[in-house]
Amino acid sequence: MINPLEALPPTPFDLFMFKTYFVNVKDKKGEGFDQYLSQVDREGYTFWYLHYDKVGTEGQIEYKFENLLEGFIQRLEGFRKYSFGKICMLGAEPSLEIKGVLMVRGQVIPQELIDHP
């Protein structure tokens, strides 16, 4: 089955090449970010803020919450080629939070993210 994001109009931003560059550049805050700003296609990608809504006692014990975050990211593995960003566990026990920012292919939240548990 073809991912609907493959049917979007072409973009000049080569996300794979940029990720390869960004992983290897030493000055991510300077040179890396400048390259990013000069290359990103704001018509082909959008930015989304993530905030995990905790249920019950989630976020109180670090190792359990970290496992939850790692599982969340692992299940997004197939989505890597359409996104770039950072998801972090922030704070301290018993008030941990999961927040992040993703740059995603397209102008709407892809169904793949909406359906993600």
Image (cartoon, rainbow, N blue to C red):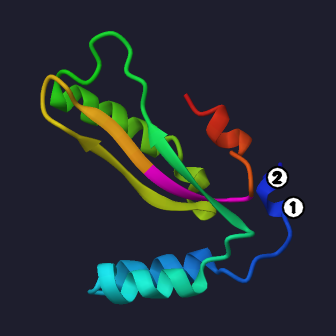
Location of residue 12 (image quadrant)? bottom right
Residue 92, horizontal then vertical, whole percent? 13, 34
Residue at the far left in the pictured view: 93
Residue 93 lies left or right of residue 53; in this view the side is: left
Give yes or no for contact between labels 2 and 1 (Cβ–Cβ under 8 Å): yes
Callout 2 amino acid? Pro
Taking the image as shown, residue 36 lies to the left or right of residue 69, namely right
Helix or strand or loop: what does disc 1 sit on?
helix
Residue 4 numbered tag = 2
Residue 6 vs residue 58, the one in the foreground:
58
Compared with 110, 114 (above or below) is above
With respect to residue 97, does 1 lie above or below?
below
Q: Quadrant of residue 81?
A: bottom right
Residue drawn 36% across and 90% down?
31
The residue under the point 45% across, 44% down is 74
Look at mark 1 in the image and give the residue it sits on: 7
Amino acid carrying label 1: it is Ala
Magenta stretch encompasses residue 22: no
Q: Which residues are magenta?
A: 101-106
Q: Quadrant of the C terminus?
A: top right
Q: Residue at x 74, y 69 (%)?
A: 43
Tell me the SS state at disc 2. helix
**Does residue 59 appear left or right of residue 42 in this picture?**
left
Magenta region includes residue 103: yes
Against 51, residue 38 (above or below) is: below
The local crowd at label 1, few if under 14, some if 14 to 19, many if 20 or more residues have their Cα within 10 Å, is few
